[in-house]
Amino acid sequence: MRILKTMTAGAFACAVSLASMLHAQAQDAASLTAFDGVWSIDNIHSNWSDGKFPTGRMSLKIDVKFDNGHLVYHSKNDTMKNKPPMEVSFDAALDDKPYPVTGSSRYNFVRIRPIGHNEFVVLELKDQDVMVGALWTLSPDGKTLMRWGIGKSEKGVSKAYQEFFTRAS
């Protein structure tokens, strides 16, 4: 009988702990709406570990919207003035499962996972291969979005990056 009581108490404690964790994750996902808006890259503060960040030339805008447990994303990169802009879009649930991406030859799936009230993880995959792993963080005042990650080129060469964005709307 004592073993049964101990097992029941242990199961109850696990259930309470799991419910608490799920509630906290739901609160974190709900608070991510502070990221909503259009963001423009801040060329001065952004950098790549290989030293080849196109300072003064990088032209990237991202539109971020958290809606009903999903991240709806659209970006427009028109840094290369002699080529059409690259536009990437996806609609991904915050469940760390792969969702399709349109507009990118470098990756075709994305996985999103909230990890705090002002941050989440983004994995960009080419089929099952992780091409980019990034932490997105919002500044406490809500005016700066920072993406820190490591990306692998189509040639298999990796570099770290830190990109800062300012709110355009």
Image (spheres, rainbow, N blue to C red):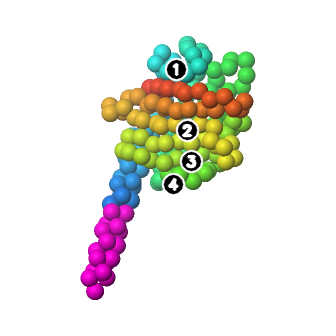
Q: Is residue 87 above or below residue 112?
A: above
Q: Which residue is mark 2?
A: 133
Relative placement, left or right, of 41 versus 132 is left
* Amino acid on which disc 2 is placed: Gly
Alpha-carbon distance for marks 1 and 3?
Answer: 24 Å
Name the residue: 68% across, 18% down.
81
Pointer 3 residue: 111
Q: Please give the range of residues in magenta.
A: 1-18
C-alpha distance separating marks 2 and 3: 10 Å
The percent position of residue 159, horizontal first and vertical second, equals 59, 27
Which quadrant would residue 55 be assigned to in this image? Answer: top right
First in sequence: mark 1 or mark 3? Answer: 1
Q: Which of the 4 image quadrants contains residue 144?
A: top left
* Numbered badge on residue 95: 4
- Height in image: 161 above or below 125? above
Report the front residue among 48 and 105. 48
Marks 2/1: CA–CA distance: 16 Å
Query: Is residue 25 magenta-colored?
Result: no
Give the image quarter of residue 16.
bottom left
User: Disc 2 on helix, strand or loop?
Assistant: strand
The image shows residue 127 at horizontal and vertical percentages of: 69, 47
Could you tell which of marks 3 and 4 lies nearer the N-terminus? 4
Q: Nearer the viewer, residue 149 or 34?
A: 149
Q: Secondary structure at mark 3?
A: strand
